[in-house]
Amino acid sequence: MFALADASPEAKEDAVKALQTELVELGLYEGGIDGDFGPATTTALSALQKEAGLPSTGDFDAATFSALQQRYLAKVVGPKQAAAGADATTTTTAPAGDPNVLQSGDEGPKVLALQQRLAQLGYRPGSPDGRYGPGTESAVLAFQKHEGLSRDSEAGAEVLSRIQAPSGAGPRSSAPGPRIEVDLDRQIAFVIAGSGTVTTVNVSTGSGKQYTDSDGNTAVAYTPVGDFTVYEKDDGPVVAPLGTLYKPLYFKEGWAMHGLSSVPAYPASHGCVRVSDDDQDFIFPLIPVGGAIRIYGTALGNPDQASPGF
């Protein structure tokens, strides 16, 4: 996700924003979530590296990424899951090639079986081709969030056991579709089609942190809670002051559910509900203008300081 050297400028900026958000939540970064890999970000990475016993270079290499994820799982995800009453067990990323863990790049019948089971349960692992690609990673992450498991997008023993008998709660309402429910605590959305079919997708919502908007004003990245309806939808990329919204479904005063190339495991947006571009391609035609969006759970940040974000 953080292969910045080969990414497009837009993807680089999104990845740096996600990195900065994690560093903020770990108490290592006090700058703006601006996508600029500048001195403040390298200083924060140097502090992380020092804590982890790594050379304090400020570079974001593989060892630093691993250290960041381990600390984020232990210090942020675990406590949030515990507060929500979920299983707060955390794991570290499995080494590449671990035969007991299915992960990005793996291929074969085990991956195919995983994809088929995820699709059967209402997730979107992509084409059932036996290849563990971005769609499967996203679906596994959504499943982990749904079940209160560690969030690493890998199918280890924990996932492979639970997927046979999942126990996470589904949508709160039995109202007919088409509609959407967004669970802020688990960072997932339920997309309920007109037929009643439920699809579960990975989302990232407001981080609760302060940021500087395009006019130089300070705002808080807050996702509103309540019952809304889609009042406008745009079938394509929409360039907004804080970034590009892919096929946005606007539901409140500029807040939208929209696609983005990278959707992390944690709240990272400026207030909008982010899903992957591929998931938004699926959602967009299902939810009409007037379609219901219910958002519930714990919204991070002060709503009095919020403004529509990215």
Image (cartoon, rainbow, N blue to C red):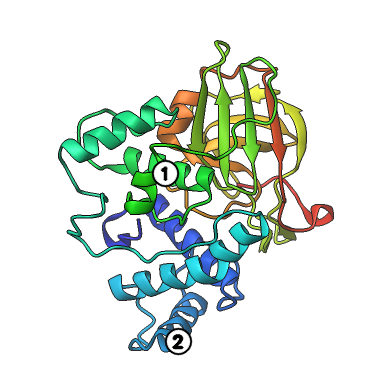
Q: Secondary structure at mark 2?
A: helix
The reply, left or right, for residue 98 in relation to residue 35 is left
Quarter of the rendering containing residue 212: bottom right
Q: Provide residue 149's location: percent of width, then percent of height.
A: 48, 53
Considering every residue shown, the one lying at the far top of the view is 195
Q: Provide residue 48's location: percent of width, then percent of height.
A: 45, 81
Cα separation, mark 1 vs mark 2, equals 34 Å
Q: Provide residue 179's location: percent of width, then percent of height.
A: 63, 22
Q: Is residue 18 above or below residue 71?
A: above
Q: Is residue 256 above or below residue 198?
A: below
Q: Secondary structure at mark 1?
A: helix
User: Residue tagged by mark 2?
Assistant: 51
Q: Is residue 30 above or below residue 199?
A: below
- The N terminus sits in image quarter: bottom left
Q: Kindly identify the residue that appears in the image at 52 percent across and 78 percent down.
A: 40
Q: Kindly identify the residue that appears in the image at 57 percent across and 66 percent down.
A: 76
Checking the image for residue 162, the label placed there is 1
The reply, left or right, for residue 300 in relation to residue 120 is right
Q: Provide residue 155's location: percent of width, then percent of height.
A: 33, 49
Considering every residue shown, the one lying at the far right of the view is 304
Type of the residue with mark 2: Glu
